[in-house]
Amino acid sequence: MAKARTDLRRFTGFFPMTVLCLVVLYAPLAVVAVYSFNASTSITLWGGFSLDWYRDVFSGPEAPKFRQATINSLVVAVVAGLAATLIATSAAVAMHRAGRFRGKTASFALINLPLMVPEVVTAVASLIFFTVIGFPGGIGTILLAHITFCIPFAYLPIAARLATLPDSYEQAAMDLYATPWESFRLVLLPLMVPGIMSGFLLAFIISLDDFLITNFVKGAGVETLPTAIFGAVKQGIKPNIMAISTLMLAISVVFVALSWLIGRNGKTQQ
């Protein structure tokens, strides 16, 4: 006899606890977004609606610093996202199409290790590694650290997509005299595209938003947007920082939503 499914919404206190969690998680973000449109220089007193702080982000005295930091962040995020996606795609194909092999479980654990290890541990380990080998801090160290950290984020949607694809597609192609490379390139790879795009978008936004690892390995004189914001906040919170934070939040929401939509559409089109 099949067990009846338990509806968690019927538990006493479920609704108030849900509301409390949502308020704790999203109320600070809503406050930052609202006060980014504040006409007053105060970060607590409302002075009317204004877009002045968004203009200040692009043309104010601190605009050149934030512009260069944004360029650095975008370059690192694009390259790290592409590299992590390429590695994750290769790993997913090996894990799901190579059958059983010695060390498969260990390989899976190694791929997902950055998800399980606290980020500060990864940051400190990366810093120690680069120091030991004499690699000076800069864009290169940020890029290598981000590629390592982003691999599991790119791997998860790619592996999830590949797990839904039966190997009968490749077998049918090879029955029609396609080589293993042709069956992968012409059959399997196009079917994996939604997962690959979803993985890239997720890796891109994780890299773009990362602060902790970047702050440890960036070296002197190199800033990404999150570290530039942190440096500005140490001198006092200004309304233009709220505007930048709101823009980053909006970009993050858009990319995560795109990643989810692409992954979902890939499942429905299968």
Image: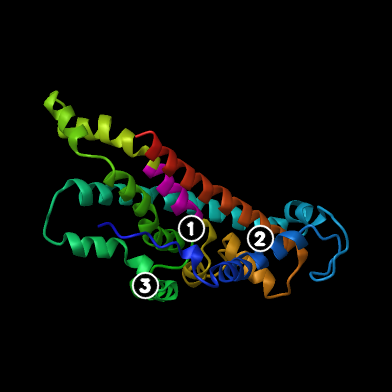
Left or right: where 5 falls relative to 202: left
Q: CA distance from mark 1 to mark 3?
A: 16 Å
Residue at the spot of label 1: 206
Q: Is residue 145 visible?
A: yes
Looking at the picture, tell me which residue is in the foreground, 10 or 192: 10
Left or right: where 84 falls relative to 31: left
Is 173 drawn above or below residue 223 in the view shown? above
Say which residue appears at 37% left-offset and 59% top-offset: 5
* Label 1 residue SS: helix
Say which residue appears at 38% left-offset and 40% top-offset: 267
Q: Amino acid at mark 1?
A: Ile
Left or right: where 255 falls relative to 245: left
- On residue 245, the disc is 2
- Mark 3: few/some/many CA within 10 Å (<14, 14-19, 20+): few
- Mark 2: few/some/many CA within 10 Å (<14, 14-19, 20+): some
Region rendered in magenta: 195-205
- Mark 1: few/some/many CA within 10 Å (<14, 14-19, 20+): many
Examine the image and state in which quarter residue 132 appears. Answer: bottom left
Residue at the spot of label 3: 117
Q: Residue furthest front?
A: 1
Q: Is residue 67 visible?
A: no
Say which residue appears at 32% left-offset and 35% top-offset: 191
Looking at the picture, tell me which residue is in the foreground, 264 or 108: 264
Q: Are marks 1 and 3 in contact (CB under 8 Å)?
A: no
Q: Is residue 168 magenta?
A: no
* Label 3 residue SS: loop
